[in-house]
Amino acid sequence: MDSFEQKLFDTLSSIIEDDQTEVIIYSGPLERPHDDLLVRSYCGKKKKRVLLLLATNGGDAHVAYRIARCFKTHFEHFSVLIHTVCKSAGTLLALGANEIIMSDHAEIGPLDVQIRKADEIGERSSGLTITQALASLQNHAFSMFEEYFLNIRVRSGLQITTKSAMDIAADLTVGLFAPIYGQIDPLRVGELHRAVMVSMEYGERIGKQNLKDKALERLVTGYPDHGFVIDRTEAAELFKNVREPNEKEKSLVTQINSLLVDNIDEDTPYVCSLSEWYFKMKAEKEVPHEQGNNEKTGDDKAGEHSEECAAGKKPDEIPAEAAPVQDK
């Protein structure tokens, strides 16, 4: 075991053994079928605590909900540790945690759903875009009607009746805004509204324990941009239990920082259990190895497992006993 692995082993020992905590890394997009790895691994196994080190730009809300639901069901205490970016569906996943741990570098984001743009490849728009556009148009239309009506009444010296002034103002306003409203597809509006409601419904189901009053509505509709930065200070306004990492957690994220950061933009997420690696290494340290035989030593095997995970293996290709912990 090299110096890096030994230091990580010691750090994990204080968390896993002392705190009786399962430690898991998830870095990358929240997409199917990668949630199956976690659900299959922990379904039906009631454990005490789980610490999820999460780094993601978002993904599928259904995947985020499924993982959060699994951890809430099968662990007595669920913590999410964020050391870098955790946006969109990542924020939804974090809603299900009993506590959210955020370093000074961490940020979460709003929950407005991202929808694929019609006739565009790879481009997405916020599910709130059309809703906000409609609200803006409504405000402008009313202001224009009011301005037309008052100007007609005042400049005519009140010679034009109120009813006539209203009719003229209405005709002018409709003529101005009708072409704009005509470009809006009502089916698309309904689709976007339904997508936004997905976040609301999932958030209500998994976020009751930690969300403050009206925080969910604020996360879904209260921010002007999907990329808006919500740091630990602002997160404390939304969640009941938000804290900075303790010394053991700070040491852990410092050691595995590259695994969190380097994989966040990959097509395939980096998903694995540091607890499995820890107990694998612990068992191999306790078993004496004969010198001179042809079998690979524990350190050799650990290196292979580390290289496999560091190379970005798909979740279903990672051996159950493997643990991805080689610093890049």
Image (tube, rainbow, N blue to C red):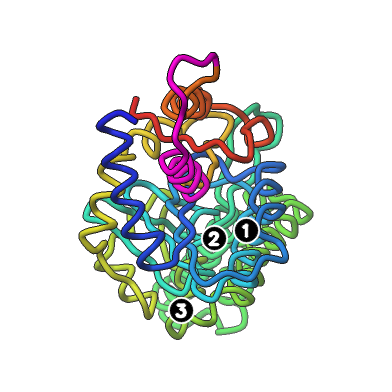
Give how far apart the Cα atoms at labels 2 and 1 are.
7 Å
Q: What amino acid does circle 1 point to?
A: Ile
Earlier in the chain: of badge 3 and badge 1, it is 1
* Residue of label 1: 67
* Residue of label 2: 93
The residue at the far right in this view is: 187
Circle 2 SS class? helix
> Is residue 287 one of those drawn in magenta?
yes
Is mark 3 in CB contact (under 8 Å) with mark 2? Answer: no
Circle 1 SS class? helix
From the viewer's side, name the closer residue of 64 and 245.
245
From the viewer's side, name the closer residue of 156 and 50.
50
Give how far apart the Cα atoms at labels 3 and 2 are.
12 Å
Is mark 2 in CB contact (under 8 Å) with mark 1? Answer: yes
Majority secondary structure in the magenta region: helix
Q: What amino acid does circle 3 point to?
A: Asn
Magenta stretch?
A: 275-294
Q: Residue 126, percent across and down?
A: 55, 50
